[in-house]
Amino acid sequence: MEFCIGEKGMVPILGQMSNACPERPRILLVAPNISRLMGGEAIKALQIFETYRDLGYDVVQVAHARVRNEMRDYRPELEIVYVEDGPVQVMLYRMGLKWILDVVGAWLLHRKAQQMIDQCPPALVHVTSPISPSVPNFPLKGAPVVIGPLNGNLLHPDGLSHRESAAKRVGSRLLRSVQLVNRFFFRGRVGAALFISGGERTVRALALGGCTRDQMIFTLDSGVSAELRDRPRLRHEARNTRFVFLGRLVRYKGCDLAIRALARVPDATLDVIGDGQERAALEDLARSLGVADRVNFIGYVPGGTELFDRLRPYRAFVFPTLAEANGIVVQEAMMLGLPVIAVNWGGPAELLDASCGILVEPIDEEHVVRQVAEAMARLIDDPQAADRLAAAARAKAEQEGYDWPSLLHHWADIYDDILARRGDERRFGPWLAARQPEGPASALPLGATS
């Protein structure tokens, strides 16, 4: 018999489980990776799992065994069921057959989750990643299923399409074919409730795969830590020439555009927090433009307290990314009270508006560089404008519930609606209210079912 570690010790997850089934409603989360070290989706999947558990919800996670050692060292009390990586997956990874590897991995996760549902049905299953609307999902039976937030199908703006990778261009041309395959062979999204955060571009991609709008519930893609929510926002006073770029150093993030803009603002400095394959090229660019003494490459800084403390001295966050489906770093900057200069495209365009950020139209590279430079120069000498943007961004982040606890309480309310429509008497909200007499923090609605 196979076991996982739960709050009450070792709990069987296969075989006879009648005595192990929880009385309160349980959430079964499914994601390939949950990790602080693997970036992006893996970090978000872990944050969802941790936050639900820390809020008092009864939650168990299914993930691949490649994260086992990290999770044992990090939080051994977390209730995780692992899917072992077999020789077929190793072979596919070494051969670079990513799409086939995704299908095999999705099948193994599905099989493990289905075994758990069959033995001890949870109130609800939530597949939290992958977030791409093109990745296949297999159908799960015996419990209502939520998938997402799904976010993708984002290409570069037309005026900057020359910067897009060949692989991304090929993928966009294959989207319709891939979604037709999903429609007929991988029908896990049919009948599921789909969390959507990528706007109409994601809706269109899912529609090609046979999904309907009445399945889709619009919500935020991600949240920020409660620690950041509880910090006082930054105040902007006096002149400040310091700017920061934060993100992986890959081409689509547009750090080169930020450095080129800096070269047009003589007294500004730019700290680059992050690392990646473009770092050497970016250092060469700074030298060629004569601004190497004003660009400081700090490298990777772990998220959390250390990063938030580092962001305090800056006038603004410069982030001219060209293919950011969401923009968690934008949400963090907004909650912190750090004005954002970004391109009016993708996730940042959905999070920001003229009242709480500076959005540059993606007409072409020259236009982006010039407008980013003008925004930097303006904010240097206008602390009142910077502070107005900071205050408005923080207010929006608080009102719309950007922090993880508010966002997940909102999701739990949606879970309750799904259970109610199915005639299931179990509810997450009433249980949590009974456990905490003051009741959970109320999150304002973040979207509506189309």
Image: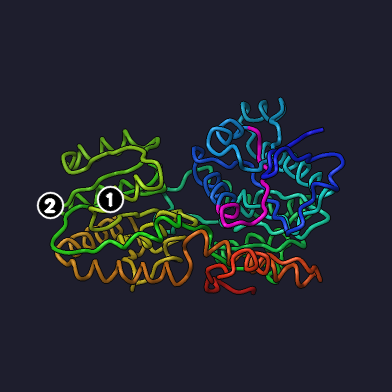
- Which circle, 2 or 1, is nearer the viewer? 1
Which residue is at 21% across, 51% downward? 262
Q: Position of residue 211 (x, y in %)?
A: 71, 63
SS at circle 2: loop
Q: Looking at the image, is 37 positioned above or below residue 367?
A: above
Neighbourhood count class around disc 1 (C-alpha, 10 Å): few under 14, some 14–19, many 20 upward = many
Which quadrant, please, contains the C terminus? Answer: bottom right
Asked whether disc 2 touches disc 1, contact meaning CB atoms under 8 Å apart, the reply is no
Asked if residue 137 lies left or right of residue 314, the reply is right
Residue indicated by mark 1: 244
SS at circle 1: strand
Q: Looking at the image, is 194 positioned above or below residue 87?
A: below
Count of labels in the image: 2
In the rendered image, which quarter is residue 158 located in?
bottom left
Front in this rendered view, residue 223 or 441: 441
Asked if residue 382 lies left or right of residue 251, the reply is left
Which quadrant, please, contains the N terminus? Answer: top right
Give the colour scheme shown: rainbow
Neighbourhood count class around disc 2 (C-alpha, 10 Å): few under 14, some 14–19, many 20 upward = few
Q: Which amino acid, by three-letter code, is at mark 2?
A: Asp
Which of marks 1 and 2 precedes in the sequence?
1
Front in this rendered view, residue 121 or 323: 121
Is residue 344 at all visible to an observer of this figure? yes
Q: Which residues are magenta?
A: 51-65
Q: Position of residue 272 (x, y in %)?
A: 29, 44
Q: Which mark is residue 421?
A: none
Asked if residue 155 lies left or right of residue 307, the reply is right
Q: Which mark is residue 267?
A: 2
Mark 2–mark 1 distance (CA, rounded to whole Å): 14 Å
Which residue is at 41% across, 61% downward? 229
